[in-house]
Image (spheres, rainbow, N blue to C red):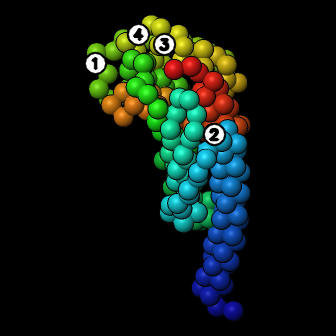
Amino acid sequence: MDEKILIISLLALLITLQYRWGRKLNLKLIRGLSSSMEEAFQPVKAEYTWIGGYVGVVADYKLKTDNYTEAKLTISLLPRHSLFYLPVSLLTGKRDRVQILIKARSKIPYSSIHFKTGRWIKPPEGISELKRGSRGINGEIVHYWYKNKETLVKFMELFENLKIPGGIKHLAVNQAENAIYADLKITDNTAVEFIKAFLKLSI
């Protein structure tokens, strides 16, 4: 067999195997996380929209709780089905994540507040009027920008009750949208643990 044909055939086989493996794994992760999120949120209605083939899904939940009306989740996964794009994603620091926007039923009483975890972080935009601080919790550094001490204490208790606080990459109260935003890792059940702890907060 011609050497070039052999190389092309092997490459095609690798691409096919990678695609099947990556597709299967991403589908498993999305279905597992979606199921866990539904269990945590208990939505009265749930709609899902696929994004980018097998790299993610957008979920819209209608909630019927005393405090919240809806939640929008964007689950983004590494492109495990792509032999060529996966290494690039890993080198650029991409990760499996879920971004959540939870809308409150009544006006949020919390003042503006942001939390980020990690040693090297980029401060949020538009925070010049907020005070800044940081604190170590369960081996993680939690950075925060806040206006009201009472609000800070309430949310710090949330971090203290999590096994892996670093799973919350960004948490913020968005008063303009009357919503709470969270950017979470999906490993180690972090996202589900956060949701269950968050929904217990009284607002």
Q: Amino acid at mark 1?
A: Ser
Q: Name the foreground residue: 40 vs 86.
A: 40
Determine the image quadrant of residue 192.
top right
Label whose residue precedes the other's in the sequence (2 or 1): 2
Residue shown at 29% from the left, 26% from the top? 126
Cβ atoms at labels 3 and 1 below 8 Å apart? no
Label whose residue precedes the other's in the sequence (2 or 3): 2
Per the model, the C-alpha gap separating discs 2 and 3 is 24 Å
Q: Amino acid at mark 2?
A: Phe
Per the model, the C-alpha gap separating discs 3 and 1 is 17 Å
Q: Amino acid at mark 3?
A: Leu
Can you tell which of label 1 and label 4 is closer to the viewer? 4
> What label sits on residue 148 in the rendered view?
4
Q: Amino acid at mark 4?
A: Asn
* Secondary structure of residue under mark 1: loop
Q: Position of residue 53 (x, y in %)?
A: 54, 66
Can you tell which of label 2 and label 1 is closer to the viewer? 2
Q: Is 51 located above or below residue 177 in the figure? A: below
Cβ atoms at labels 1 and 4 below 8 Å apart? no
Per the model, the C-alpha gap separating discs 4 and 2 is 28 Å
* Secondary structure of residue under mark 4: loop
Q: Residues within 10 Å of mark 1 (few under 14, many from 20)?
A: few
Residue shown at 61% from the left, 47% from the top? 44
Q: Which residue is mark 1?
A: 128
Q: Which residue is mark 3?
A: 152
Residue shown at 70% from the left, 42% from the top? 39
Q: Position of residue 115 (x, y in %)?
A: 48, 23
Per the model, the C-alpha gap separating discs 1 and 4 is 14 Å
Q: Which residue is mark 2?
A: 41
Q: Is 12 located above or below residue 63 in the figure? A: below
